[in-house]
Image (cartoon, coloured by chain):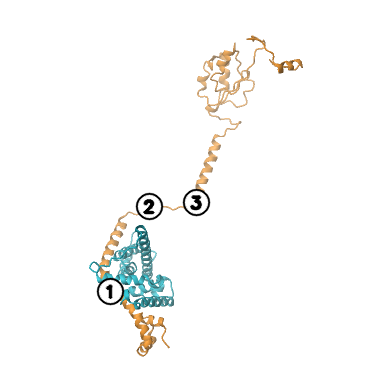
Amino acid sequence: MKWNREQETRFQRVYEEVFPIIARVTSRITNSTEAAEEICHEAFIRYYHRLDQIPDEPQAKYWLIRVSKNLALNYIKRKKREKKAYERLLKEPSREQRSGETITIRKETRQEVQRALEQIPEKYRVVLIMKEYGDLSYKEIGDVLGLTEGNVKVRAFRGREKLAGLLQQGGTYGA
Amino acid sequence: MALDSELLSAYLDGEVPTPWDERIRERLESSQEDLRVYESLLGAKNFLQNDRKITDENIDSMKQSVWESIQKEVSADLDTPHRGFWHSRLTVPTPLVAAAALLLFFSFGFTLARSIMVTPGQTQLPPQQASAEAVGFGIPVSNTIPDIQTLFSTQLNGYPLTPDQLATLRLLADPTRRPGSNNGLGVTINLQDVNQLLQLLQGASNIREISIELPGVNGFELIGEPTLVPGRSRAHNQGEPTSP
């Protein structure tokens, strides 16, 4: 593919604006910086090949967020399948390594967030992550996911309510 | 009456427009019940915001790393020469391929059938398919004659031919002759005994039809003791004609 100066500039602008959003969102969904990097790379390469088809920058932003969100969800589904297969193979559940010396507090915090979010239904979780990590408005989230603003508002509330309930149960999820 | 929890969640997200957000703020200062719900939702928000701060620490390095990998891949793509039409990948639906294969198969079969079909009235036959007929001794020699001149040079299947017989056979074997015009033409070869007949027939793969006329005078000799055959003798008694 050949791209002209205008396309190159547009690509850079979109990258500057959108990368932090999809990096945070995919990092949270996958709970892995490496996986998030791969997903961001894949999403922008796909965008590069569709520069002619997506000339509008806001549309490019929503398209990139949607693609990277789907890639991240596919990633965790694949990981879950692999984990189950691994457990079946060994016939015992995998134990998480939580020895305090090897794992930092930050990692532990992230694991707690991950465990809490995994208990929230995906349709609420995705909206909540986009809101908290992507700084997207209800309208933008609706544009990305194909939902109305009202629906996004309800889902954000349901997700947050569920998370608050988990935190109030105490134990693992102390804020 | 307590505030709608969804409204409080939207207020947390800054999604409540101006006149209403002020009223909600005032309400939270006066209502303990609303404040409790609000703080619960705020706790969930802060839980994620704290985690987000950890994520943000890696964003710059991620951004640089991914940008470099994208640049590398894009540069490689730009350096790749544009592939022309003949190198482009063409996707053809399977049903179309099957239909094309069937069409090709039938058209090929039809052409092949026409090419091998030989009609009786066909005049321009290739030399390999020429035929000759002979009446009397009767020969229609046909099928894959390798070389007519060699075949009829001096003899037929090892039996010596006279010049007249040779000329007749060459005439019959001429590929340019019209089929069906051989009526009445033929070569009659007189043989002395059965051995000569066998010699003539031996290796006569090119002869399609032979008529054998036995001699009029019975020259057979009786070999062995005569025996009576019941069926035959009854037929003789009834006067039915039998051929020798």
Q: Give the mark, 2 or 1, whose residue is nearer the N terminus.
A: 1
As measured in the structure, the alpha-carbon distance from the residue carrying label 3 to the one carrying label 1 is 57 Å
Chain B, hue in figure: orange
Location of residue A133 (image quadrant): bottom left
Residue A161 in sight from this viewpoint: yes
Q: Can residue B55 be seen in this snapshot? A: no
* Horizontal and vertical percent position of residue A141: 39, 73
Badge 2 crowding class, 10 Å Cα cut-off, few under 14, some 14 to 19, many 20 or more, is few
The quadrant of the image that shows the C terminus of chain A is bottom left
Q: How crowded is the residue under tag 3: few (<14 C-alpha within 10 Å), some, or many (20+)?
A: few
* Same chain assignment for discs 2 and 3: yes
Residue type (three-letter) at the residue carrying disc 2: Gly
What residue type is disc 1 on?
Answer: Lys
Left or right side of B1 for B199: right
Report, in whole angstroms, how far the alpha carbon at label 2 lies from the one at label 1.
50 Å
Query: In terms of depth relative to the viewer, which is nearer, B179 or A138?
Result: A138
Q: Indicate left or right for B100 with A11 as reference.
A: right
Q: Is residue B118 above or below residue B95?
A: above
Label of residue B96 in the image: 3
The secondary element bearing badge 2 is classed as loop
Chain letter of mark 3 equals: B
Residue furthest toward the front?
Answer: A92
Give the residue pinned by disc 2.
Answer: B84
Is B150 rendered above or below residue B126? above
Upstream in sequence: badge 3 or badge 1: 1
